[in-house]
Image (tube, coloured by chain):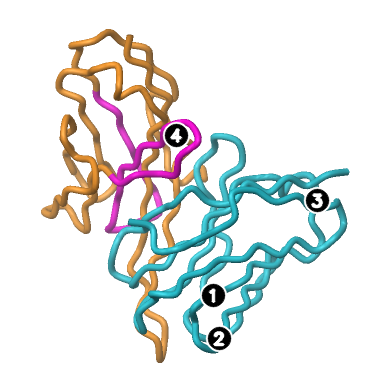
Chain colours: A cyan, B orange
């Protein structure tokens, strides 16, 4: 069972920040928050993960609330190539990832 | 990711035929996974293997079997294909990675997928 709730779809203007929310109110202390994306029907691509602290890499930033019950993935300057389905996943480190339906992000020119 | 390859990339077959999908990886990872994806849905886990001698059922293993021939190879078989097994199939690999102070996390790397159609 997916343990996360995400909006079905979102739009974002090209060049603007895309903020994708995720609720995971039942997250356990040993569970990470992962974000993946899937462009068209390609294999999902890892974006970022975090446990407690906010994280940033070359693709995105992950903001996790202090109570860890929700998080936001931020794409700072969305481009048309960021149009994809974004999956928020919570999972302990030693189990396979369970994917929900994700958020379909459309970046509009 | 070119490090994880799947063959064939596309396959059309008939009901009742035996089909094998193959996955190979050059990442040196111990863990391998098979998922299927139906239109408009997320990925669902079929089987996974944490090392060569380990096989585990996932959420939807009925009608499928797997073989872990080597660390680098993980095959998925449909013994007698049926139309509702028409889907996109993904293989993935991971390495159990330790992270200081917080335990271990599991970054999975996916292959390009195999589109299977059962008529």
How far apart are the two marked residues, 1 and 4, measured between alpha carbons? 31 Å
- Residue B92 in the figure: left or right of residue B60: right
Q: Secondary structure at mark 1?
A: strand
Relative image position of residue A45 (x, y in whole percent): 54, 52
Q: Which residue is mark 2?
A: A53
Q: Which residue is mark 3?
A: A79
* Mark 4 surroundings within 10 Å by alpha-carbon count, few (fewer than 14), some (14 through 19), many (20 or more): many
How far apart are the two marked residues, 3 and 1, measured between alpha carbons? 25 Å
Q: Residue at x 32, y 56 (%)?
A: A1
Q: Residue at x 87, y 57 (%)?
A: A15
- Residue A72 in the figure: left or right of residue A25: right
* Magenta segment includes B26: yes
Image quadrant assignment for residue A58: bottom right
Main secondary-structure element of the magenta-colored stretch = strand
Q: Earlier in the sequence, mark 3 or mark 2?
A: 2
The number of numbered discs placed on residues in the rendered structure image is 4
Q: Secondary structure at mark 3?
A: loop
- Residue A66 in the figure: left or right of residue B91: right
**Which contiguous range is marked in magenta?**
B20-45
Q: Which residue is mark 4?
A: B113
Q: Which residue is mark 1?
A: A70
Q: Nearer the viewer, mark 3 or mark 1?
A: 1
């Amino acid at each position: 069972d997916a343990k996360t709730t995400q909006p079905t779809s979102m739009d974002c203007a090209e060049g603007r920040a895309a903020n994708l929310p995720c609720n995971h109110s039942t997250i356990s202390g040993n569970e990470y928050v992962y974000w993946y994306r899937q462009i068209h029907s390609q294999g999902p691509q890892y974006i970022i993960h975090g446990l407690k602290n906010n994280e940033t890499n070359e693709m995105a930033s992950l903001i996790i609330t202090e109570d860890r019950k929700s998080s936001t993935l931020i794409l700072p300057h969305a481009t048309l190539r960021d149009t994809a389905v974004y999956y928020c996943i919570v999972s302990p480190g030693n189990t396979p990832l369970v994917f929900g339906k994700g958020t379909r992000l459309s970046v509009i020119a | 990711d070119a490090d994880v390859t799947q063959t064939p990339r596309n396959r059309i077959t008939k009901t009742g035929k035996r089909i094998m999908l193959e996955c190979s990886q050059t990442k040196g990872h111990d863990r391998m996974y098979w998922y299927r994806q139906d239109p408009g849905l997320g990925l669902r886990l079929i089987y996974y293997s944490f090392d060569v001698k380990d096989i585990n059922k996932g959420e939807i293993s009925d009608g499928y079997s797997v073989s872990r021939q080597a660390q680098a190879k993980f095959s998925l078989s449909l013994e007698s294909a049926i139309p509702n097994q028409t889907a996109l199939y993904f293989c993935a690999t991971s390495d159990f990675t330790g992270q200081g102070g917080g335990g271990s996390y599991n970054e999975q790397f996916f292959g390009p997928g195999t589109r299977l159609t059962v008529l």
